[in-house]
């Protein structure tokens, strides 16, 4: 009996020693693996958590997509750059697969977030415009620098010419621009109201602001447009301002209550001259920024917006930042009319192509165009909206912010995102479970226990979102669609094929 007892103790000791050796080997592997990632300063998918006593200052990208998880996005038409595997960053294999989005994913709209100079145009907008045109879509763009067409041509020169019509509406180069009689285009009451808001801005919502004066300006401007349309087949913004003459209006409207604009204008025409001037001063100022000869030149009859939206091609609306409110108003007027035509598709399904609205520096439109309503309804009308903002806080109204960003199924966030942008994306991504396993051996090596604990940590912390350590033109892509991946994707958006 003693022999077997001694033998059993020996076997037990050997087993415990084997367990300790296995545990030590496992811990050593985990320690080395975590230490490598932590020493490198970057943890990626599959890396264990750094063990106690190791480095504590590292970027944690364990919650992003691995190469296997993005394999189904390889080579799709709407480029989102080249995948970066954080675990291989710094090696020859850390960038190896060019990724893209499928056409149908963009049916849920997209937003691109990044500061000026972060690469939104070359890295995202130009490749997406190219892909949309190659897919046979109609593309409408707001060009805030005035060189978007040239950038697209430079891209297509390397990827192959497309051969679609390009219409450029550019008051800064009026002689080379197409003309578009947008004053006459505002045909329905909805279009007319949208144009009036585009010129005057949206009604102030502040409790300290008296809405009477805004509504008076709205009434006057609506009447001027109606009267100008009745008086001419090709009215321009200059014609609207020229009508703001009390004597002329009295001579034109007197005794003619059925003429368009009479109801809106006549109550102000019969006032004393001083009161008439006060009643029309706001509209006079608003129209003053649209009376430049170049604006009048490109506001004559020419393009037919319905024809433009019904065929594959590019309608490029040039509204440079340097031209201030004139550019903002023209951009807003154009989008107001276009969006109203697109809304009509909700009741009359289009037979033409899908329309892509690409709105660079979309924050400039927020005071004049209801973007929240636009992205909420036009998906059903066969429209995809791609908007660019420098930061989420540019959308000042929190209700609008939630609606606009919430209706975008794809988000591209570029390096240098603001603190508020990073906080928003952190919240949108939510948390992920992190499992920690600990092995404990009794004081005399007689027993071993394993402890498992789970805690929830952010998928990405704000620093990982805003301060990507992978290069100047890198970003994160978030795809809210089960057909892709529910994890953020780290990408390199540099486009050497667009270099001069």
Image: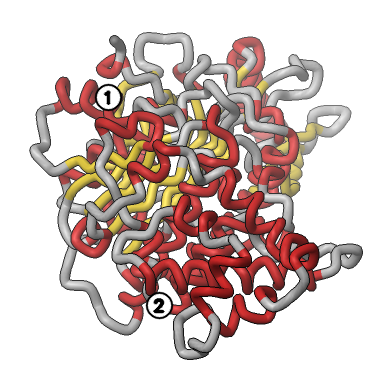
Q: Residue at x 66, y 56 (%)?
A: 401
Q: Which residue occupies the foreground of this view, 498 or 145? A: 145
> Which residue matches tag 2?
188
> Which residue matches tag 1?
150
Q: CA distance from mark 1 to mark 2?
A: 35 Å
Q: Give the answer, above or below, for where 466 lies relative to 360.
A: above
Quadrant containing the N terminus is top right
Quadrant containing the C terminus is top left
Side of 426 relative to 468 (left or right)? right
Q: Characterize the local packing of mark 2: few (<14), some (14-19) or many (20 or more) Cα atoms within 10 angstroms.
A: few
Q: Position of residue 88 (x, y in %)?
A: 45, 18
Seen as rendered, the residue at the extreme right is 208
Q: Which mark is residue 194?
A: none
In this picture the colour scheme is secondary structure
Q: Give the answer, above or below, for where 16 lies relative to 226.
A: above
Q: Position of residue 495 (x, y in %)?
A: 33, 20
Q: Give the answer, above or below, for where 449 lies relative to 123.
A: below
Q: Position of residue 262 (x, y in %)?
A: 54, 81
- The disc, 1 or 2, on the residue closer to the chain's N-terminal end is 1
Q: Which residue occupies the foreground of this view, 261 or 414? A: 261
Q: Position of residue 79 (x, y in %)?
A: 31, 36
Q: Residue at x 34, y 76 (%)?
A: 344
């Amino acid at each position: 009996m003693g022999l077997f007892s001694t033998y059993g103790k020996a076997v037990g000791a050997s087993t415990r020693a084997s367990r300790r050796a296995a545990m030590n080997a496992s811990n050593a592997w985990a320690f080395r693996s975590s230490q490598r990632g932590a020493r490198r300063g970057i943890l990626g998918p599959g890396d264990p958590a750094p063990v106690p006593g190791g480095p504590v200052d590292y970027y944690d990208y364990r919650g992003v997509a691995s190469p296997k998880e993005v394999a189904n996005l390889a080579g799709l038409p709407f480029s989102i750059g080249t995948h970066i595997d954080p675990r291989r960053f710094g090696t020859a294999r850390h960038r190896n697969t060019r990724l893209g989005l499928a056409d149908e994913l963009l049916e849920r709209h997209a937003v691109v977030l990044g500061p000026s100079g972060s690469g939104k145009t070359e890295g995202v907008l130009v490749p997406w415009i190219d892909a949309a045109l190659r897919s046979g879509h109609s593309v409408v763009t707001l060009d805030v620098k005035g060189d978007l067409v040239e950038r697209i041509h430079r891209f297509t020169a390397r990827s192959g010419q497309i051969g679609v019509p390009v219409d450029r509406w550019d008051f800064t180069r009026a002689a080379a621009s197409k003309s578009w009689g947008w004053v006459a285009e505002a045909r329905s009451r909805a279009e007319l109201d949208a144009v009036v808001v585009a010129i005057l801005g949206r009604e102030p919502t502040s409790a300290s602001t008296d809405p009477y004066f805004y509504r008076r300006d709205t009434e006057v401007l609506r009447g001027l447009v109606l009267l100008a349309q009745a008086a001419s087949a090709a009215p321009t913004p200059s014609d609207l301002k020229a009508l703001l003459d009390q004597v002329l209006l009295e001579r034109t409207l007197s005794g003619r209550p059925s003429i368009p604009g009479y109801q809106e204008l006549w109550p102000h025409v019969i006032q004393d001259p001083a009161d008439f001037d006060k009643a029309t001063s706001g509209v006079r100022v608003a129209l003053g920024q649209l009376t430049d000869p170049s604006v009048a030149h490109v506001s004559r009859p020419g393009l037919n917006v319905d024809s433009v939206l019904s065929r594959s091609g590019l309608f490029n609306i040039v509204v440079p930042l340097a031209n201030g409110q004139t550019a903002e108003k023209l951009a807003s007027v154009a989008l107001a009319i276009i969006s109203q035509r697109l809304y009509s598709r909700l009741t009359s399904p289009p037979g033409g192509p899908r329309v892509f609205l690409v709105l660079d520096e979309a924050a400039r439109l927020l005071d004049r165009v209801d973007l929240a309503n636009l992205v909420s309804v036009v998906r059903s009308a066969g429209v995809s909206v791609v908007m660019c903002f420098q930061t989420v806080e540019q959308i000042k109204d929190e209700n609008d912010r939630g609606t606009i960003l919430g209706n975008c199924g794809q988000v591209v966030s570029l390096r240098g995102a603001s603190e508020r942008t990073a906080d928003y994306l952190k919240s949108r991504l939510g948390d992920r479970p992190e499992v920690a396993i600990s092995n404990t051996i009794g004081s005399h090596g007689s027993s071993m226990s394993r402890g498992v604990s789970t805690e929830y940590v952010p998928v990405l912390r704000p620093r990982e979102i805003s301060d990507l350590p992978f290069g100047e033109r890198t970003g994160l892509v978030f795809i809210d669609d089960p057909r892709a991946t529910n994890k953020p994707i780290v990408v390199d958006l540099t486009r050497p094929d667009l270099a001069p």
